[in-house]
Amino acid sequence: MGRPRSRRRPVVVVCVALAVLLALALAVVHVVGPSYGVWLVPPSPRAHGEHALSLMDQGLHAHGDEWDRKRAEALDAVATARSRDEVNEIIDDALAVAGGPHSFLLTDEEQQQTQEDYQAPTHRVDGGVMTVKLPAFSGTAEQGQQYADELATALAASGACGVVVDLSDNSGGDMGPMLAGLSPLIPDGPVVSFDTSLAQSQVVLDGGSVSGGGTPTTAEAGSSKLGVPVAIITSGRTASSGEQARLAFNGIADTRVFGQPTRGYASVNQGFRLYGGLTMFLTVGETLDREGTRFGETPIEPDERVDLDQAPSAAAAWLDSKGCR
């Protein structure tokens, strides 16, 4: 009678195989994880800086002699840096070259503060004219839904013969809730396009649903389109996603912009998580409106330049000329 086969060998083989797979998985996470904001162990100051600089190579201005010099200078500096705080200063300096003036670093604490400082859009009606004022927005998903719903519901139920969209204090943030909130005023289809070194993509409105730009957001009331004249007010404080909201009306009949030129941050930003509760917002492209006109780092002129305190009356006069008062 033969000796029974040991049952331990298959178990050992399985354990070894699992250990190998685990080791491979950890190796992949170690190499690829930082690109997705995942670290198995804290990076050294040098690795932290080198990772950020490699991401900056996607920047709108990350080409040519100026970037080559700044990148080499930054690599030398991070090689001898003693702390991540020191490296963050080097990153911030290089970011201004690779991405330009629209690029910046944001800490988790600063992001938390924007959520605590959340402001909802407001509206008022004067005769047949509704004025909606859109503040900047960088809050939570729940706050974004509230922002979009309050705005779209007020517009859809207004019965207004004309609307003033006041973007004069909108310094940007998350464009998704802004466009969803304005969807009763914007026809369905492509709104703007983003042109980067990697690809061109569209921001699309379908009913009250926005996709392709900012947080995907749906405002149910957005499927009710008003089809009325729209006057827009901008200022030098109108920036980033505030400018995207302004560009959403380009090429639409019976719209006119009043006030002052915008900040000139209509370029496209992408956020990258860095170690230590830091997000790097890097400018990676430019915006094309629905007519194909390109916008980036140049202030956007209004159709009618007037002092900001005169813009509401100028907008009202134009709406009056359209038969709305």
Image (spheres, helix red, strand yellow):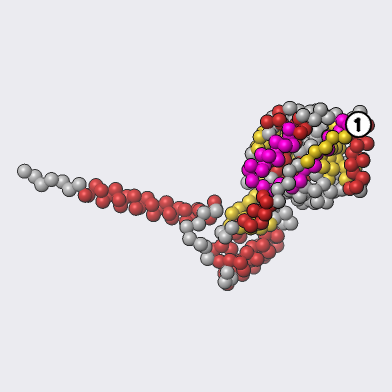
Taking the image as shown, residue 104 lies to the left or right of residue 305, namely left
Counting from the top left corner in percent of width and height, residue 104 is at: 68, 57
Counting from the top left corner in percent of width and height, residue 23 is at: 39, 54
Q: What residue did someone put label 1 on?
A: 325
In the image, farthest residue toward the left: 1
Q: Residue at x 70, y 38 (%)?
A: 148
* Magenta span contains residue 207: no
Residue 213 appearing in the image:
no
Q: Residue at x 73, y 34 (%)?
A: 152
Q: Pick the quarter of the image with the N terminus.
A: top left
Range drawn in magenta: 127-153
Q: Nearer the viewer, residue 105 or 135?
A: 135
Counting from the top left corner in percent of width and height, residue 211 is at: 65, 37
Taking the image as shown, residue 153 lies to the left or right of residue 25, namely right
Give the SS element for disc 1: loop
Q: Quadrant of residue 226?
A: top right
Counting from the top left corner in percent of width and height, residue 71 is at: 64, 63
